[in-house]
Every structure is written in C-alpha cells, then in structure tokens.
Image (cartoon, rainbow, N blue to C red):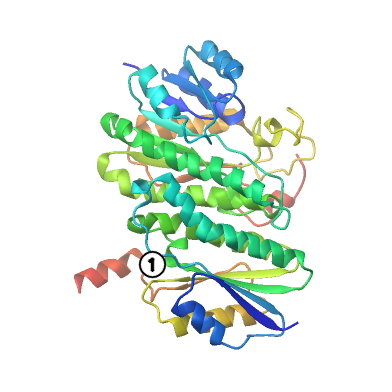
C-alpha cells in the first residue's frame, strides 16, 4: 500500500513541489489549499485528492478530510504559511494576529489533529519553518518570531510524541524560487531572481530542492531522525557575512 | 529621559525590577513574561496556546513597537522562562512562547532606537538575581541581541541533569 501524505499550502511554491515529489516517490497525496481550482489542478496532475479550506479557520480540519480520503496518514506536511514585509515598528496588530493564526496556531492545531493517525501508522509530521526562524530578519520581524516558535513547537512535539512513534521535524528554507518571495502578492514576480542575495553555493534554492529534503525526512531513511530543523538555504545561515558577497 | 518601565507578569520578579534604580541614562523597558507552567504543548488546546501568547508575547511586541516608534533610544530587557533556549517538552507551551520572546529581542536588537536582550530564567532563581542580571543587561552598551541564561547550569550540557539525578 502506498504511503499517504497531507500537504497544507500544497497549491503553490514549496508546497506544490513537495506534493509533486512525494507523488513521484509513490505517495498518495492530499493537496490542501484555499483555492479549489489550484488544489484540483495539482491533485489531478499527481493523481491525488484535493482538500479545500483555510488552515486559519479553526472549523476547517484538513487532517480529518485527508485521512478520510486516503484511509489514514503516514506524513502530515504542515507547510501553509503567510508572511508580512514589516519590520518591528511596522508590524500592526492585524499583521501579528494573522501571522500567529496561520504560522503557529494552525500548525499546532493540525499537528494535534494528526497525532493519532500518525501514531497508528508510525508516521511523521513535517513543518515548514524558515531560515528566518534560525537567524531572524528584522525586515520580516513578525514572520521571524512565528518561525522561531514553529521550531520550538517542533522540538517539543518530537520529544513529547516520540514515545508514540511519531517523528516531528521541520524544514528551514532560505529564499526559494518559487516560494514565498515570488508567490505572495506584492512581493517579487515569479521567476525574477535578479538582485536576490547570493548564498555561498551561488545558486538560488529551488522549491524542488526543499521538496527533496522533505521526501528524505518523510521517508524511511529518516526513521531515526526527529526534532530536527533542516536548513535548505544554500549556506545562507552558515556565516554572518557569506551571503553579502554578491547578488545572484 | 532617564527612567524604567516594567510591564508584564506581576509577581516578585516584577517587584524587584521596579524597586531597582535604572541602570543607565537611557530609557529602560523591562518586559516580564513569566507565566505559570502550562504543561506539554501537544496536550494543550490551541485556544489555550493562543491565550498564553496573548498574555505574554503579543503585549511585548506592542510595547517594543511603541518604544521603537517614540524616537527615544531605549534599552530593553525581556525576562522569560529558561526554556526559550533549550526547550522542555514537559513545559512545552511556555517553551514555544519563550522562543518567540527570544526572537522578538533578536529582531528588536536590529531595530533603530532599540537595544534588546533576554534574561532567560529557571523557575527557582531568586528575584534579586534576576533583577541583577537585568540591570547588567540594561547597562552594557555593547550587549544587544543576547540571551543571558539564569538556570544554574541546568541546560549547560546534557550531563548536568544526568549528574543531578544520579547524585
């Protein structure tokens, strides 16, 4: 029987790449997102199922919908997130409320919903945090705060649920194409990486790179890996100055 | 304008900080975020986690935002649970919130007009020790974006807890 995964925020950027990669690896995938059209398109493309709704809505339970559609879950990828291009003085109450609701509280709620399914299957949770959660970025202050919280949540749940056989890990992508830099309205245009800071490896991280890391952490080769936040940033956080040396 | 404002969780630590004279010539803002333990975060309903954030981190963000916007250079100290650094899954809810407070200080440290540090304290640290550490953090011009851990070395290494249990 194929392994079964739910991917929230699965309709664009990193989430869509994870859906495609897991499907290519033989997983059956529930593609979750707010847009029925986009979720349906990707689900049709990969032979998966679409789960439509807003993760920030406490009444929406993508975990239950996916588990019902797939007959259980072996991995829950909690990837949906939002960003606000605001420094600390510019972070309004509404900005913070949305960042908290989507990036932290929804992840917490859906992780809790997934626990029983994953304990039954010996599965895992994979959260999408950020390199900004490892080393904060003042230009996206609220986002950095929520992603640090996600990393701490991941570690706590890894220790708490490890005895149930549930692994919990996180991805910490750097600037990724396509990713939040280009898929969030008002930021950069898709495909336009001119002027991006060059990481030490020189090349901008691709969503498929992050998906590869996700496939590893979700798969059997990571059976003894839990409580890990894996940077996929081409070295952006390896040094305080390495990324300042030039534009990509 | 010299002076200190202490906000957040009321209790012995906040009182000790209010009684302490300002550490320097700049405006000082001390955020005390020491909620009661809330247990493992995986067992906590999300509404309760939200309430914990609303009682600690959200007002801290608002206070630092206001301090950054008033044009007066301000030194900030955030007092939070020691699990901001190394999480404790048995106290996971506070660990998550404390981690957010630590990142708040880090981004505040890079914000014009603010210098911010964290004093991360274990529950059994005497209030006067916390106040002394806060005074130090507020007084050192080059200390910015740092976390001072007051836990007696509990989290210094894995062996620390192992040794304590084995002795």
Q: Secondary structure at mark 1?
A: loop
The residue pinned by badge 1 equals: B155
Is B153 rendered above or below residue A235?
A: below
Q: Quadrant of the C terminus of chain A?
A: top right
- At label 1, counting other C-alpha atoms closer than 10 Å, the crowd grade (few under 14, some 14-19, many 20 or more) is some
x, y (%) of residue A98?
A: 60, 43
x, y (%) of residue B102?
A: 54, 62
Q: Is residue A237 at all visible to an observer of this figure? A: no
- Who's the residue at 38% across and 67% down the image? B155
- Who's the residue at 41% across and 23% down the image? A65
x, y (%) of residue A133?
A: 56, 50
Is B138 rendered above or below residue B35?
A: below
- Who's the residue at 76% across and 35% down the image? A186
Q: Is residue A83 at all visible to an observer of this figure? A: yes
Q: Quadrant of the N terminus of chain A?
A: top left
Q: Quadrant of residue B58?
A: bottom right
Is A30 rendered above or below residue A128?
A: above
Given the current orientation, which residue lies at the most extreme left position? B166
């Amino acid at each position: 029987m194929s392994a079964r995964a739910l991917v929230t925020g699965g309709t664009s950027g990193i989430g869509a790449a994870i859906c495609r990669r897991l499907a290519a690896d033989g997983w059956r995938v529930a593609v979750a997102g707010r847009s029925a059209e986009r979720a349906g398109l990707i689900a049709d493309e990969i032979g998966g199922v679409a789960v439509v709704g807003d993760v920030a809505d406490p009444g929406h339970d993508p975990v239950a919908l996916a588990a019902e559609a797939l007959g259980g879950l072996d991995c829950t990828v909690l990837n949906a997130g939002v960003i606000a291009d605001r420094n600390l003085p510019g972070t309004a109450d509404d900005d913070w409320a949305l960042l908290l609701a989507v990036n932290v509280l929804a992840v917490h709620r859906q992780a809790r919903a997934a626990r029983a399914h994953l304990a039954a299957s010996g599965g895992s949770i994979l959260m999408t945090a950020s390199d900004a959660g490892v080393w904060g970025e003042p230009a996206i202050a609220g986002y950095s705060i929520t992603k640090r919280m996600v990393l701490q949540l991941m570690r706590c749940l890894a220790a708490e649920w490890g005895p149930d056989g549930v692994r919990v890990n996180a991805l910490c992508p750097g600037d990724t194409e396509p990713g939040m830099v280009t898929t969030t309205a008002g930021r950069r245009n898709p495909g336009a990486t001119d002027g991006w800071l060059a990481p030490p490896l020189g090349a901008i991280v691709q969503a498929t790179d992050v998906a590869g890391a996700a496939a590893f952490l979700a798969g059997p080769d990571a059976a003894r890996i839990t409580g890990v936040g894996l940077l996929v940033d081409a070295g952006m956080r390896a040094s305080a100055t390495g990324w300042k040396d030039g534009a990509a | 304008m010299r002076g200190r404002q202490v906000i957040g969780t009321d209790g012995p630590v906040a009182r000790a900080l209010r009684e302490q004279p300002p550490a320097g010539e700049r405006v000082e803002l001390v955020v005390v975020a020491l909620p009661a333990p809330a247990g493992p975060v995986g067992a906590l309903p999300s509404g309760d986690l939200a309430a914990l954030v609303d009682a600690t981190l959200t007002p801290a963000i608002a206070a630092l935002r206001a301090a950054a916007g008033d044009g007066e250079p301000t030194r900030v100290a955030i007092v939070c649970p020691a699990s901001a650094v190394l999480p404790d899954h048995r106290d996971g809810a506070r660990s998550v919130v404390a981690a957010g407070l630590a990142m708040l200080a880090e981004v505040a440290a890079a914000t014009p007009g603010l210098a911010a540090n964290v004093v991360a304290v274990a529950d059994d640290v005497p209030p006067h020790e916390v106040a002394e550490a806060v005074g130090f953090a507020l007084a050192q011009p080059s200390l910015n974006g740092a976390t001072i851990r007051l836990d007696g070395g509990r989290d210094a290494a894995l062996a620390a807890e192992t040794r304590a249990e084995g002795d």
